[in-house]
Image (cartoon, helix red, strand yellow):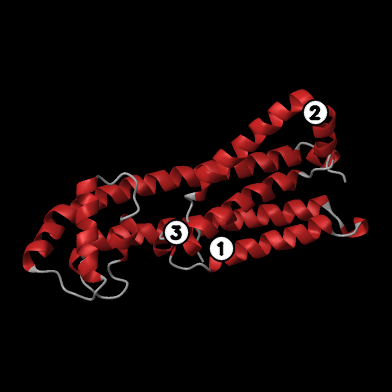
């Protein structure tokens, strides 16, 4: 089960926008905003981050063209299931409503999301390794073998010329056709080295996203450890 860490930027932008909106609302409705915050749990912030992540994957990976680079969508459904379980804990009758249990569920889910992100990074590393060690297989119409090219077509750093060549090569491979001699030579000599460079950049970017998430998760644990439970009440 995998989840692509690309959702980190989306979640960060949405969370930042939400905090800015709340900050501006505080200027005119500080008593109302304060009342709302008094009824929030620390885990609600984690759940919101996970919700942004789930929405991102549902839009771009389950329905959009990006589903080609996700591979297995099972992780997305597990994430939605975890959010549904959190909602049950959050809305349970008062005797069963437990902020600590809610935070534990949210933290465990976020940790699983991190692990699923690293599974995606490993998948990308496998793509790069295949391109480097066996480019002929990656340029063959064998189902699944040309996945490194299919995933690379979504790299934002790729220049138009390389993207055009990737699309041209994939057009043949996805139809089950072998590349002609000229196109195969061009792909091996020019495209594959470029793709390896793009993969290096992409893997570095995904690594930064994972580190950012890990730092945020550690921050939540520190906040909770230093007394967040004292204001977690409903």
Q: How many marks?
A: 3
Point out residue 139 in the picture as x, y percentages from the top left corner: 20, 66
Q: Is residue 141 left or right of residue 108?
A: left
Q: Position of residue 90 (x, y in %)?
A: 80, 55
Seen at 66% across and 56% down, the residue is: 108
Depth order, front residue of 170/192: 170
Q: Which mark is residue 120?
A: 3
- Depth check: give the residue in front, 60 or 74: 60
Q: CA distance from mark 2 to mark 3?
A: 43 Å
Mark 3 and mark 1 lie on one chain; the one further toward the N terminus is 1
| Image point (21%, 71%), residue name | 140
Side of 98 where 136 appears, left or right: left
Distance (Cα) linking label 3 and label 1? 13 Å
Q: Which residue is mark 1?
A: 76
Res. 21 image quadrant: top right
Residue 29: mark:
2
Residue 198 vs 92, above or below: the answer is above
């Amino acid at each position: 089960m995998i989840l692509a860490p690309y959702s980190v930027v989306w979640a960060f932008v949405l969370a930042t926008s939400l905090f800015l909106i709340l900050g501006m609302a505080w200027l005119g409705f500080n008593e109302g905003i304060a009342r709302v915050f008094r009824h929030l749990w620390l885990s609600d912030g984690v759940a919101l981050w996970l919700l942004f992540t789930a929405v991102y994957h549902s839009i771009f990976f389950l329905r959009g063209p990006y589903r080609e680079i996700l591979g297995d969508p099972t992780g997305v459904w597990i994430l939605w299931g975890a959010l549904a379980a959190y909602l049950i804990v959050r809305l349970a009758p008062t005797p069963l409503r437990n902020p600590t249990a809610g935070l534990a569920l949210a933290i465990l889910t976020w940790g699983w999301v991190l692990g699923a992100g690293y599974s995606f990074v490993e998948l990308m590393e496998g793509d790069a390794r295949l391109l480097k060690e066996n480019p002929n297989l990656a340029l063959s119409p064998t189902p699944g073998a040309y996945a490194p090219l299919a995933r690379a077509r979504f790299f934002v750093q790729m220049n138009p010329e390389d993207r055009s060549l990737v699309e041209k090569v994939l057009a043949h491979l996805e139809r089950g056709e072998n590349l002609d001699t000229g196109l195969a030579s061009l792909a091996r000599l020019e495209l594959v080295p470029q793709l390896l460079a793009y993969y290096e950049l992409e893997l570095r970017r995904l690594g930064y996203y994972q580190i950012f998430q890990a730092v945020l998760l550690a921050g939540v644990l520190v906040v909770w450890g230093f007394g967040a439970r004292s204001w977690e009440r409903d």
